[in-house]
Image (cartoon, coloured by chain):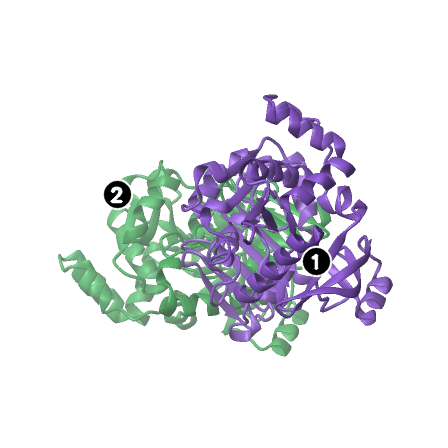
Chain colours: A purple, B green
Amino acid sequence: MSRSLYAVIMAGGSGTRFWPASRTARPKQFLPIVGGSGGGGSPMIRQTWERLDGLVPPERILVVTAADQAGLVRDCLPDLPEENLLAEPMARNTAPCVALAAFEVRRRDPDSIQVVLPADHLIRPAEAFRRSVRAAAAEAGASGALLTFGIRPTHPATGYGYIQSGEVLAEHDGERVLRVKRFVEKPERRLAEEFLASGDFLWNAGIFVWSTRAILDAVAEHAPDLYAGLERVEAGAELARTYAGFEKQPVDVAILERAASVRTIAIDYAWSDVGSWAALAELTEAGAQDNRAVLPGGARLVAEDATGCLVFAEGEQVVALVGVRDLVVVQAGNATLVCPRDRAQDVRRIVERLREEGPEFL
Amino acid sequence: MSRSLYAVIMAGGSGTRFWPASRTARPKQFLPIVGGSGGGGSPMIRQTWERLDGLVPPERILVVTAADQAGLVRDCLPDLPEENLLAEPMARNTAPCVALAAFEVRRRDPDSIQVVLPADHLIRPAEAFRRSVRAAAAEAGASGALLTFGIRPTHPATGYGYIQSGEVLAEHDGERVLRVKRFVEKPERRLAEEFLASGDFLWNAGIFVWSTRAILDAVAEHAPDLYAGLERVEAGAELARTYAGFEKQPVDVAILERAASVRTIAIDYAWSDVGSWAALAELTEAGAQDNRAVLPGGARLVAEDATGCLVFAEGEQVVALVGVRDLVVVQAGNATLVCPRDRAQDVRRIVERLREEGPEFL
């Protein structure tokens, strides 16, 4: 009776915001930066996989990743069937990724429902997330709407897009589905504060639920070049060449903002896209002297009169802090980073410079 | 006619003030931390050796070091004759070191003069230093006095012992030899300011010139146990057992402060014992944004809006600083240190903790 639920894990990110822990060859989704006790834990993509446990069986979980990260995915997800690993020839943002996965899922089961989610978000508790997905899947099956998860804002963030929600359109097992009135791009601070105060704005988190049929209809309508390209691939055209011709576009902009029937399910449990070292600090339990340490592989922190710092170090090494406060200190491989927590977003400036001056450190 | 000049390089230090660049197995004198262009250069002991070039031939340069550092000495000083490497069985501060070397030099040439100098001081220009040594050697030969180099203070340092100088007793080639009125232990700040203002106080730098006969007479008189012990060793007793019984004492305290005829030769060219990361910062040429980098082995510094920092890193790695100021950042081997420049002396607190918590990092 109920339609099969597939999951599509988007693991194509090449994020630079966790440099030097994240590298070109090992982006954030493969890092054990968060979720364990006292910081650290399994790689984020592994946590994403485990979040689906009991909701979607391994044979219906697809992972879309960059071709050169396929090995990392296999290492993290040994139970992923080989045919469920979809390699993108190049990064083209999420619209092509979503469409590629939808074509593959349609080939297997055209009547299916999908949950599409990034590999590198933190969501807790997993059971609450699964309840939301079940409700969204029921709604997607019943109404044919495209559903996006809306995160109840906790602060006036200027780094996310917002969704203005409207009235309750349906309810499934106590989870309410809301109308989406409009999408708003990353707002200025003042506007973000108004959004927060209004109570009906949600962060657009990039987690989606829809029927395979509905998303492909929407791709065909709003991104016809993308749809046509993937049809050619299905007919035998070379994926790499076709993919190269796709525009880099997020699925929100290319599809959702233009689609007629978009709904949202609001979640108010813990969510983070762990977008910077500063965000990681907030997600990591404070230790002695209010320092936070993420130390995979047995690394050590020794602090003397140092407070409010976030330290990441890998392997058998020590990071010693004396008399400093509110710094991010990262030692990973051949690189060390020191910056104030409130400047963590400027790590990208280092990465930009290293593209020119020292690609061997990226 | 003129008596042979020997040099004794004291290379027994196991300093912890440059942790984590200096380690138990590689103290500061073996580090290339200073003296090169733009920071770095040859190991300090090598610079000390080269400073003697043209003044003392290799066959008359002795190096006293810890037994387990003999290999490092040979690596840095390939021209040092093997029989000129004296290994101390254990660290006993400078009085036993000086006496051990003096016994060995007497065995070779009882009528010789010696210059005794630490392996890890920065002195520039070398030619001025050699001129001072020649004058001091002439004075030591003529008067039989023990000479200590007195550094003209540049600031009211509280970390050095002082010498109060008196009238000019002699002059050699334009270099004036002064009476030593008294030695003063490390003073309080106010007293140090008075010393600086008075103009007749000098830092006691631990660089000495004396005749082999005069220093051994002084050892016999003021440290009779030390003298007797080394006589027993000369007669065949085991050095290690004898050395273990020696008191840990600096030569200044054990001998010079008690000796009748001590004179000083004042030097006013560049000298530093490079006693901390902060001191190294002052000795290192500022680069872009007023940051100073000592990067042996091709390491790199990338700074964005960071200023006044000292960075030390070895090998093929990068240190990235964003938005920080006046920090010391060191990455060496399995350890990373971050501390404000004005807290550099507290690195010893880290070292003390690691003795208990992580000796593998020392």
Q: Which of the 4 image quarters holds residue B75?
A: top left
- B176 relative to B357 in the view: left or right: right
Residue at the spot x=74%, y=56% of the render? Answer: A263
Residue pushed farthest front? Answer: A1
Badge 1 local density, few (<14 within 10 Å), some, or many (20+)?
Answer: some
Mark seen at residue B179: none
Chain of the residue that carries numbered disc 2 in the rendered image: B
Kind of residue at badge 1: Arg
Residue at the spot x=71%, y=66% of the render? Answer: A152
In the foreground, A123 or A188: A123
| Whether residue B181 is situated above or below residue B289 in the rendered picture | below
Chain of the residue that carries numbered disc 1 in the rendered image: A
Residue pushed farthest left? Answer: B236
Q: Secondary structure at mark 1?
A: helix
Query: Could you tell me if residue B15 is visible in this image?
Result: yes
Of labels 2 and 1, the one closer to you: 1
Q: Which of the 4 image quarters holds residue A354?
A: top right
In the foreground, B176 or B161: B161
What residue did someone put label 2 on?
B83
Query: Picture coordinates of residue B332 (x, y %)?
Result: 47, 50
Badge 2 local density, few (<14 within 10 Å), some, or many (20+)?
Answer: few
Query: Picture coordinates of residue A161 (x, y %)?
Result: 77, 55
What residue did someone put label 1 on?
A343
Quadrant (top left/top right/bottom left/bottom right) for the N terminus of chain B: top left
In the foreground, B240 or B173: B240
- A117 relative to B261 in the view: left or right: right
| Whether residue B122 is situated above or below residue A125 in the rendered picture | above
| Whether residue A88 is situated above or below residue A53 in the rendered picture | above
